[in-house]
Image (tube, grey):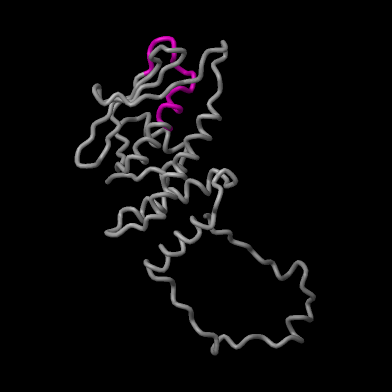
Amino acid sequence: MTETVIALDDAVDTPVLQSVLEPQPDTRMTPVLAPPTKREREAQWLECAVRAGNLADLPLADLRVMANRMFRLLDGETPPVEAHERYTAAVEEIESRLERSTPDDEDGHDRAVFKDSAFSSRYELYLDGALAAYIRYSIVSGQLTLRALVEKPGYEDRGLDRILLRHSFLNAHRRRLAVVPACPAAHTFLDRYRQYRTLARMGD
């Protein structure tokens, strides 16, 4: 869940004399609270994820934060069972929403279909049954490198590159692969949609 920061402006509603008449706290006697430890912070993440309940009611930004936090919990030596369930549920809900938000083609064609062609080592995007774009990748030691994006003739400048890269990052994240954007298209995508920097685990 995202942390909400509430800024209070005392000068707006508070009477001027209130600060004079009311006793001010003695900051010297106020105990200093230590920041939570890594284990305490991760326990809070898991508690918030479990209490979230029906993920269909959460904003997309909160889902991305939850997926990223649960992903980090799964990297531990003894990941909680609830973390795996919440991670899977969050990623599936994110993908479901992105699928629903993918617009139909202007000519009434079918929605874009994303495929992972492991044999060819590339992610592919089909439109109306035809290959419209693809991005080559390589996987070494749990690290996925996006190498080159190609849009087929006749499909350029239609926004298909964004759809393909969005699904590529989600697919890599679901497979718990570190992502390295090694092509200009991937860098441009991350500069424009910076929320995917937290959803996808970036490699060095």
Q: Is residue 137 left or right of residue 127?
A: left
Residue 191 spot, x, y in % from top left:
43, 38
Q: Residue at the location (35% across, 45% down)?
A: 201
The residue located at (45%, 27%) in the rendering is 163
Q: Of residues 187 and 138, which is closer to you in this image? A: 138
Q: Viewed as shown, does residue 176 lie left or right of 199? A: left
Please tell me how many numbered marks the rendered image carries. Answer: 0
Q: Residue furthest left?
A: 141
Q: Is residue 9 left or right of residue 95?
A: right
Q: Is residue 78 above or below residue 94?
A: below
**x and y percentages locating residue 175 in the rendered image:** 32, 40
Taking depth in this image into account, of 150 and 187 the one nearest to the observer is 150
- Pinpoint residue 148: horizontal percent, then vertical percent: 30, 25
**Quarter-of-image position of residue 80:** bottom left
Q: Residue at x 43, y 71 (%)?
A: 36
Q: Nearer the viewer, residue 180 or 59?
A: 59
- The spot of residue 140 in percent (x, y) is 20, 38
Residue at horizontal 47 percent and vertical 45 percent from the top: 90
Could you say which quadrant of the image residue 91 lies in?
top left
Is residue 19 rendered to the left or right of residue 92?
Answer: right
Kindly indicate the quadrant of the structure image that contains residue 120: top left
Q: Can residue 152 be found in the magenta stretch?
A: yes
Magenta-colored span: 151-166
Is 140 included in the stretch rendered in magenta? Answer: no
